[in-house]
Amino acid sequence: MIRFLLCLSIFSIFACSEKSRECPSVFFGGEIVNPTSDYVVLYRNDSYIDSVRLDEGNRFAFNLQGIEEGLYHFDHSPELQYLYLQEGDSILIRLNTMEFDESLVFSGKGSAINNFLIEMFLIHEQEEPLIYSYFKLDPDTFDKKIDSLRAMKVDHLNELVAENQFSEKVLTMAKAAVDYNTFIHKEKYPFYHKKKTGEETIHELTGEFYDYRETLDLNNTELAYFKPYFDFIKYHFSNLSYMNCMKYCSTENKAVHDYLHFSKHNLKLVDSLVNEDELRNILFRNIAMDYLLTEHEASKECQIFIDKFGSLSTNEEHKEEIAHLYEGIQSLQPNSNLPELTVTTVDNRKVSIRDISKKKNTVFYFWTASQKGHFRNVLKHVSKLRKKHPEYKFVGISLKTSFPQWQAMLSEHDLDPESQFYGENFKEIQTGLIIDDLYKCVITKDTVVVDAFANLYYFKPKKSPKI
Ligand SMILES: [Zn+2]
C-alpha cells in the first residue's frame, strides 16, 4: 500500500528551510483560473491519495510525506492530467480551465519532467492529423517520416537531460512519453494503410519496420496507467492477434471476421506474453470491455467469453465490473424498458428519462462542456437530423459539466430547454445507458428501447416509428 501522511497546515511549507525535519517531503500546489470544481484530487494509478479544497484565491496545496516516486495524476473535475512526483519535489502549477492542457505550466523543483510530459502530450495531439495523412505512404517513407518526428523529440529530451539531473526512473518516464506515442503509429500502420489505400490485403512488412519491438517492455507496471503506454500495448496486441489469426486460422489471406474469435486470440496472447499481474489484469479487463461494448449482445457465446475472462483475471473488482456491464447490456436489449434515470431541467427540476420519452420517438444524445469541438459537431449534426426526421425528438443530455456552466451554454448557444437536460450523476447515467462513446445515441419509442447502441452519425429511423 502507498504510505503517505499529510501535513495539517499549508503554511508550514513557507517555513521549510528553518525546520527541515518537520517539512513535507513533497509539495504540490498552485492556482486554478476559472475553476470548474472546488477540489483538486490526487491519484496514484487508480488509487485515491488525497484531495484539497481550493481557497478563496482559487489556490490549493498538497503537502505529502513518504510518497512513492512515480507517476500520479491530479483531477480537477472534469479534467485531469499527469504529475510525476519524487522525494524533495516542490511543484507549483498554474492552469486555466478554459484551455486546460494548453495553459498548464509547472514551476519549481521537479517541474522539468512534468513540463516535458505535458509538452509531449500536446505535440502528439497536434501531430495526429499529420500522421493520419502519412498512413497512405509506403512503409519506408512512412517509417522515415515517423522517425524524423521522433528524432526532434529525442533531441529536445537530450537538451533537457544536459540541463537537469534526471534520475534513471525519470529518464525512463520521459523516454516512454516519446517512444510509445511514436511506436503506436507503427502498430496502427498496416490497418490504416490498407484502409487509406484500398489495398486488398495487409501490406507485407519487413522485419525492420518493427525493429523497435525488440526494445519493448511489456511488463512495466510503473507505466501501466500511463495512457500512451497502455494504448500502445493495446494496439500492439491487436496487431499480433490479427497477424496470428492470419497465420493460423485464415482462409484466402483474410483474418476471421468475428470479434469474439479475435478477442479470444487477444486474451490468449496477453496470457502468454505478459507476466506482470496488474498489467495482465487491466489488459484482460480492457479486452473484455472492448468485446462487450462492440458486440453489446446477450448470447451464450458471450457468457462463455466472460467466463474465460473470469478464469484469467485475478482482480475481483474487474470481474464484478464486467459482470455488471454485461447485466447492463442485457437490460438494454431492444424492447426492454428504459432504465429509471433522473436528469435535471434548466429550472432545476428532476425528471426521469422515461417521462421524457413517453409517447414519443426519442433519440438521446450526449455532450460535455470540456469537449468543445465535439459539442459543436453534435449540435450541427442534430439540427440536420431534426429537419430530416421530424418524427423524432432529439434530446441532449450534458454530462461532466457543472450546472451553472450548462445553463450558460444553453443560453449562449440558444438551445431549446425543452430538449436539453443536465445529467448530474455521471457515473449512474454512464453505466445505466452504457455511454462508451460521445457519439453514441439511444433510440427509444415510448419508454422502450429500440436501439441503445446507435451512433448519431449513422442514425437511421427504425421500423414503424409512428405512435
Ligand atoms: Zn483466428
Image: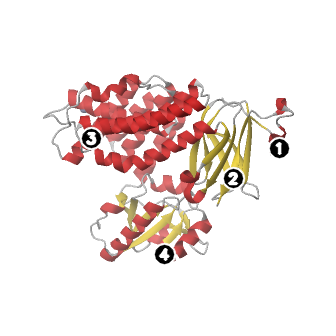
Q: Are marks 4 and 3 in contact (CB under 8 Å)?
A: no
Q: Quadrant of residue 49?
A: top right
| Inter-mark Cα distance, 2 to 4 | 33 Å
Give the mark nearer the N terminus: 3 vs 2.
2
Question: Crowdedness of circle 4 by 10 Å Cα count: few (<14), some, many (20+)?
Answer: some
Q: Nearer the viewer, residue 113 or 262?
A: 113
Establish if 413 lies above or below 59. below
C-alpha distance separating marks 1 and 3: 55 Å
CB of residue at label 4: within 8 Å of ligand 1?
A: no
Where residue 438 sits, quadrant-wise, is bottom left
Cα–Cα span, label 1 and label 2: 17 Å
User: Is residue 229 in view from this perspective?
Assistant: no
Q: CA distance from mark 4 to mark 3?
A: 40 Å
Q: Residues within 10 Å of mark 2 (few under 14, many from 20)?
A: some
Write down the residue under mark 1.
9
Q: Which residue is mark 4?
A: 415
Residue 31 numbered mark, or none:
2
Residue 191 tag number: 3
Quick check: marks 2 and 4 in contact, CB under 8 Å? no
The location of residue 395, given as percent across then percent down, is 44, 69
Q: Can you say which quadrant of the picture contains the C terminus?
A: bottom left
Q: Residue at x 58, y 71 (%)?
A: 407
Q: Is residue 161 above or below residue 455?
A: above
Amino acid identity at mark 2: Glu
